[in-house]
Image (cartoon, rainbow, N blue to C red):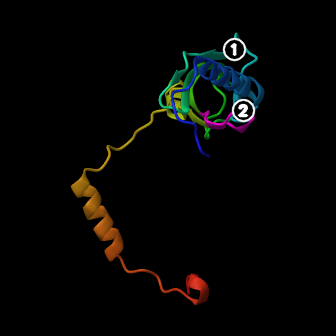
Amino acid sequence: MACPEGPLEPDVIAAAARSVEADVVDGFARMVTARGFSPELHDSGLTANEALATSDHLVVVPWVYHCTHTGDFLGVPPTYIQLELRGTTFVHACAAGSDDWEYYRYIDFIGALQQLGVATTSRPALSGEEFDNWDKNRQDRPQPPTGEGGAPA
């Protein structure tokens, strides 16, 4: 998608924020309900933070969605804990009409798990040297023989 030159106009940024709110109300609520969260059990909904343009065609809209854990979520049975799902929607808003904008959503499910009391761990990123060693060892491993068409024999 070719983008026009120059910064986004304030009305485009505001339109992107409104479209993210509509996306959350219309589509996101169904998606999180399917994942075990209910917006109906208490004062729920979207709290959109201020939208900002980070380039000539990208609008970033951070948001908070208030909900209750009422179903299975990543193997965690319902806890009925009220929590805030936090996320950010990136809107590629370089097309003339909003119907052609592209949306990319990040949802902090690790944060949701922590609010539910699930212990989460992560390992630190590898240093450049550690990655090189890992990659070398991976490449040096014997590969299983393959049959016709590259399938394992």
Q: Residue at x 69, y 14 (%)?
A: 44
Q: Which residue is mark 2?
A: 97
**Could you tell me the amino acid type at mark 2?**
Gly
Residue at 70% over, 25% down: 19
Residue situated furthest top in the rendering: 43
Name the image quarter holding residue 21: top right
Considering the numbered disc 1 on the image, is that residue within a helix, a strand or a loop?
A: loop
Q: Quadrant of residue 68?
A: top right
Q: Say whether disc 1 or disc 2 marks the residue closer to the N-terminus.
A: 1
Task: Give the x, y percent position of residue 76.
Answer: 61, 35
Q: Is residue 115 left or right of residue 93?
A: left
Is 80 placed above or below 30 here?
Answer: above
* In this view, the mark in front (1 or 2): 2
Nearest the eye: 100 or 133: 100
User: Residue 108 at what x, y percent from top left?
Assistant: 53, 31
From this view, report whether residue 145 is shown above or below residue 96. Answer: below
Q: Which residues are magenta?
A: 92-103
Q: Amino acid at mark 1?
A: Ser
Dot 1, crowdedness within 10 Å: few (<14), some or many (≥20)?
A: some
Q: Is residue 93 visible?
A: yes
Q: Nearer the viewer, residue 34 or 86?
A: 86
Place of residue 137 in the rendered image (x, y in percent of width and height, measured from the top left): 30, 69
Q: Position of residue 80 (x, y in %)?
A: 66, 21
Residue 55 shown left or right of residue 102 in the figure: left
Sort mark 2 into few (<14), some (14-19) or many (20+) by Cα contacts within 10 Å.
few
Residue bearing the label numbered 1: 44
